[in-house]
Image (cartoon, rainbow, N blue to C red):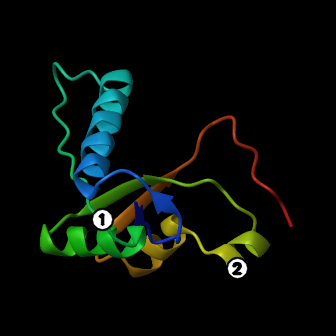
Amino acid sequence: MTVNEAGLGVDMKEHDFYKLAQVQMDKFLKEHFDLSSDQPETHIIQGRPFLEIIKYARSNKIDLIVMATHGHGALSSMFLGSVAEKVVRKAPCAVLTVRHPDHKFETP
């Protein structure tokens, strides 16, 4: 048994994690995109999400990042941080954040 970054025991090998992630990504693409006309490019990368997104954008000269946000309130963002918030602040390009239309944002 191996131990993941959170200190939890894991029985899967690293290769299996990548394989499972790719299967889940393929399922997501089939459910949400018309793959006959759209051919999105996907990459499974290990690391801290906001850092990897920023590094990928820099190294590939990306001009727009589109990502979802959960709309956490100001207090929870202050303590927990937000991947979208960190990407917006540090990205080398424009960032468009979108939210699910049914999600209700907290107001202070």
Is 107 situated left or right of 71 in this image? right
Q: Is residue 46 above or below residue 38?
A: below
> Which residue does the numbered mark 2 point to in the structure image?
78
| Camera-nearest residue between 12 and 67 | 12
Q: Is residue 32 above or below residue 60?
A: above
Q: Callout 2: 10 Å neighbours few (<14), some, many (20+)?
A: few
Q: Residue at x 66, y 74 (%)?
A: 80
Q: Residue at x 76, y 45 (%)?
A: 104
Q: Residue at x 40, y 52 (%)?
A: 11
Q: Position of residue 63 (x, y in %)?
A: 23, 64
Q: Is residue 59 above or below residue 73?
A: below
Location of the N terminus (image quadrant): bottom left
Q: Position of residue 2 (x, y in %)?
A: 39, 64
> Which residue does the numbered mark 1 point to in the structure image?
46
Instruction: Please name the amino acid that badge 2 sits on.
Output: Met
Closer mark to the observer between disc 1 and disc 2: 1
**Which circle marks residue 70 in the picture?**
none
Q: Quadrant of residue 62?
A: bottom left
Q: CA distance from mark 1 to mark 2?
A: 25 Å
Is 46 situated left or right of 73 in this image? left
